[in-house]
């Protein structure tokens, strides 16, 4: 794959675009990254974030050697140690914890640093073999996926590339111009042919500014909006009766349900004009091939699973599923049909049934869990001190003197500051991996482009060495990267037919056999009835309302404080950050212009706030400090802090997740990052 000084690679970040990259290398150093022009989805361009990646590789924050803590927890004071002594210490400390408290007293914590299948899952087999507590990885997509499954069934979505043939595109709860940049060229193609773009989002983000129409609904009210649209679709007969009859389940009970959502009531709930709701329903109901790109935004609300499920009902009423260019996309990951057991090794549990702990409760787990308490924590490719809810509790837990914490990282994050042992991690340009995508249909492979910086080792290598220390002799731990990839690719799959490792090594990527504007649900849905389920018996059994059902958003505010926290805080991704990745780079910080809070002029005036003022933002969980950005680009009553800044680069040292509740959403166990009551005050100088 290397030609002259150029090398093909793949962006490992947690983003639906999973770009194919061309890496420029000079004398073993990465000079620049560019989008691969030969990749149909990447289309030769990349985001501003990844253009800055070389700065991350060689950043002064980069961890180059293993470290052992010398100062108090949180101080980030360390001394260098050798890999051998770092690994020996981890082995010794973990073994002592296991002897005294049992293996469940050890908890792995990992999430988003890399999407590469080998590195991302590298810890699973080791912790399974150990019998450690298992981590329920709910922080991002599990609410949305659960909601989707109840309506549509486990698995696939329409290929978003198909949207070029659409005449109406709805970006619903997705800030694509920041979080899914590479669908924009497909969208533009459709718009050139006359398609309209509607964005449904509580604030005027970068995507909304480009839309033909922006519907600025109240956060957490999408289910009501979907019910209101369905009311109109059915009343005005903008529906496909034949499709409903053949392919859906529960239409009659849905018809009854939506009677309660005439435009006036829907308008009261959502804060949208009744006329706008009518226009939206008409546009959707009369379009030839309406396409909905669902984002994660609405799923980060308490009723988030229900919202995803309810919006997904629209194409089932109109039959848009079948119309080339129409349809709906949440995620494409299921097309790849890989054998995840090949990387996760659940067989190594070998009859053990360790407890499972929900990652969004990390703070509670570390400060309250007692049966047994967590005494050993291994954090890799994740930065929970910045990204997990209830930051105050997370930090309180990480400060515990009796907790032995290992952090495997590339850069000196806040989480690293609390480690007992820090291990230096390779970047994607320094290790091998296989990549699927959750936003497109290309399988990709990348070999290292440069040698590891300093003494950095990959996730896989670290867990291989630890397995060796613990005397785990299962062949699982000694397989080569190629053997693992072959095993991932082993299950026969029509989508993957013709794609093998030699091809991936030669070309870097291969498109799955997915018809671009095809309907993945031609032969049915992957639900218990095999139909699209307006009514879901599984939901009923799970104690959830079986029909789309709107509940006003609530919050975890302790009784009595609701009145004191009248504003709703949303914390969607910042354009130049990838969760907390990049937030430490100076050039990127300049582009993001400091942690700020978008606040409506009327809310600002009520509090004597003017643009640029320094603000205290607080609720019962704590306080953080942000600069006021007074703007009509957010609704009255809704404040927005684009995220995630590193806590240590925030004034006062508290990050935005100080204010975020760790209460679970309605399904899937996820957090509500975009609905937290706060009050805002001018900071005294
Ligand atoms: N630049 C950038 N790109 C990223 C990331 C990043 O941090 N920065 N993160 C990556 C990751 S891990 C993920 S999971 C994805 C997430 O990316 P998206 O799928 O876009 O999800 P969010 O950004 O959480 O929210 C999208 C939009 O939903 C809106 N929203 C909030 N509440 C509601 C609601 O109740 N209803 C509606 N209709 N909209 C609502 C938010 O205001 C936001 O504009 O992005 C990935 N890409
Ligand atoms: N307030 C608020 N909080 C949020 C969100 C939000 O919208 N609002 N979004 C949430 C979402 S959607 C997600 S997915 C989570 C993500 O939260 P995290 O999992 O914490 O993801 P990142 O912040 O990107 O941090 C990943 C870290 O992994 C490191 N890393 C990268 N590659 C490797 C590797 O190969 N090996 C090792 N050992 N380390 C590596 C990077 O240097 C980086 O510091 O954040 C969530 N937190
Ligand atoms: Mo995410």
Image: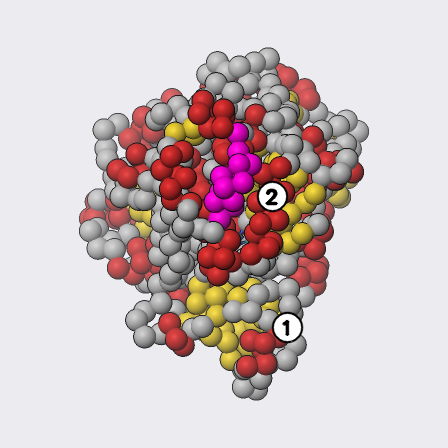
In this view of the protein, can residue 344 be seen by the observer?
Answer: no
- Secondary structure beneath dot 1 equals strand
Q: Earlier in the sequence, mark 2 or mark 1?
A: 2
- Against 498, residue 102 (above or below) is below
Tell me what residue is drawn at x 30 percent, y 71 percent: 559
Asked if the magenta segment contains residue 229, the reply would be: yes
Q: Which residue is mark 2?
A: 282
Q: Nearer the viewer, residue 272 or 442?
A: 272
- Which residue reaches farthest front? 236
Between the residue at mark 2 and the residue at mark 1, the CA separation in whole angstroms equals: 34 Å
CA neighbours of label 2 inside 10 A, class few (<14), some (14 to 19), many (20+): some
Q: Nearer the viewer, residue 518 or 49?
A: 518
Tell me what residue is drawn at x 49 percent, y 65 percent: 569
Count of all numbered marks drawn on residues in the image = 2
Magenta region: 228-240
- Going by the image, does 108 lie left or right of 590? left
Q: Nearer the viewer, residue 288 or 585?
A: 288
- Going by the image, does 296 lie left or right of 528? right
**Chief SS of the magenta region:** helix
Q: Quadrant of residue 10 in the image?
A: top right
Residue 81 spot, x, y in % from top left: 47, 51
Q: Nearer the viewer, mark 2 or mark 1?
A: 2
CA neighbours of label 1 inside 10 A, class few (<14), some (14 to 19), many (20+): many
Residue 628 spot, x, y in % from top left: 61, 74
Residue 375 spot, x, y in % from top left: 29, 53
Q: Quadrant of residue 292 in the image?
A: top right
Q: Quadrant of residue 471 in the image?
A: top left
Tell me what residue is drawn at x 65 percent, y 69 percent: 631
Q: In the rendered view of the protein, which quadrant contains the C terminus?
A: bottom right
Q: Which residue is mark 1?
A: 630
Q: Is the C-beta separation of discs 2 and 1 under 8 Å?
A: no
- Secondary structure beneath dot 2 equals helix
């Amino acid at each position: 794959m290397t030609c002259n000084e150029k090398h093909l690679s793949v962006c490992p970040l947690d983003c639906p675009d999973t770009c194919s990259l061309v890496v420029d290398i000079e004398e073993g150093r990465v000079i620049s990254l560019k989008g691969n022009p030969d990749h149909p989805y990447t289309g030769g361009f990349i985001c501003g974030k990844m253009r800055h990646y070389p700065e991350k590789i060689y950043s002064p924050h980069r961890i180059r050697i293993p470290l052992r803590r010398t100062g108090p927890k949180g101080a980030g004071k360390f001394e260098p140690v050798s890999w051998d002594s770092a690994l020996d210490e981890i082995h010794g400390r973990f073994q002592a914890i296991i002897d005294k408290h049992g293996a469940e007293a050890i908890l792995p914590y990992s999430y988003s640093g890399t999407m590469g299948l080998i590195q991302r899952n590298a810890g699973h087999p080791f912790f399974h073999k150990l019998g450690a507590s298992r981590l329920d990885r709910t922080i991002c997509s599990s609410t949305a996926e659960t909601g989707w499954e109840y309506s549509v069934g486990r698995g696939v979505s329409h290929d978003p590339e198909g949207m070029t043939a659409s005449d109406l595109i709805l970006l619903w709860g997705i800030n694509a111009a920041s979080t899914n940049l590479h669908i924009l060229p497909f969208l533009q193609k459709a718009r050139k042919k006359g398609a309209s773009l509607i964005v449904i989002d509580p604030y005027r983000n970068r995507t909304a500014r480009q839309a033909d129409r922006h519907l600025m609904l109240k956060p957490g009210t999408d289910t009501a909006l979907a019910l209101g649209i369905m009311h109109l679709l059915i009343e005005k007969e903008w529906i496909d009766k034949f499709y409903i009859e053949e392919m859906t389940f529960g239409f009659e009970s849905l018809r009854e349900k939506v009677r309660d959502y005439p435009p006036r009531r829907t308008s009261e709930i959502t804060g949208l004009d009744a006329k706008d709701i009518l226009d939206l329903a008409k546009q959707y109901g009369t379009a030839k091939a309406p396409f909905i790109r669902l984002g994660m935004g609405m799923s980060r609300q308490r009723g988030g699973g229900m919202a995803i499920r309810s919006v997904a009902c629209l194409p089932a009423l109109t039959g848009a599923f079948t119309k080339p260019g129409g349809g709906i996309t949440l995620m494409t990951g299921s097309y790849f049909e890989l054998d995840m057991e090949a990387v996760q090794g659940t067989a190594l549990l070998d009859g053990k049934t360790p407890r499972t702990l929900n990652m969004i409760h990390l703070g509670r787990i570390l400060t309250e869990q007692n049966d047994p308490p967590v005494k050993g924590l291994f954090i890799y490719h994740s930065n929970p001190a910045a990204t997990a809810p209830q930051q105050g509790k997370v930090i309180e837990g990480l400060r515990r003197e009796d907790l032995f914490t290992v952090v495997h990282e590339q850069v000196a994050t806040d989480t690293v500051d609390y480690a007992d042992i820090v291990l230096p991690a390779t970047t994607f340009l320094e290790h091998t991996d296989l990549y699927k995508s959750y936003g497109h249909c290309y399988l990709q492979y990348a070999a290292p482009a440069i040698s590891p910086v300093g003494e950095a080792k990959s996730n896989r290598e670290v867990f291989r060495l630890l397995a060796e220390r613990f005397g785990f002799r299962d062949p699982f731990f000694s397989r080569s990267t190629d053997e693992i990839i072959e095993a991932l690719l082993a299950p026969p799959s029509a989508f993957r037919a013709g794609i093998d490792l030699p091809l991936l090594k030669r070309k870097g990527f291969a498109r799955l056999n997915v018809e671009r504007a095809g309907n993945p649900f031609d032969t049915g849905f992957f639900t218990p009835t095999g139909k699209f389920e307006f009514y879901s018996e599984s939901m009923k059994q799970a104690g959830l309302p079986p029909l789309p059902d709107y509940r006003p958003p609530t919050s975890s505010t302790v009784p009595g404080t609701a009145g004191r926290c009248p504003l709703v805080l949303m914390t969607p991704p910042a354009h130049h950050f990838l969760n907390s990745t990049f937030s430490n780079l100076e050039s990127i910080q300049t582009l993001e212009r400091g942690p700020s809070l978008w606040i409506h002029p009327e809310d600002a005036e009520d509090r004597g706030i003017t643009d640029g003022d320094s603000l205290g933002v607080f609720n019962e969980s704590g306080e953080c400090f942000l600069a006021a950005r007074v703007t009509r680009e957010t609704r009255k009553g809704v404040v927005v802090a684009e995220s995630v800044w590193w806590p240590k680069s925030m004034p006062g040292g508290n990050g935005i997740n100080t204010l975020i509740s760790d209460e679970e959403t309605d399904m899937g166990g996820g957090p509500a990052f975009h609905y937290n009551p706060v009050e805002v005050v001018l900071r005294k100088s």
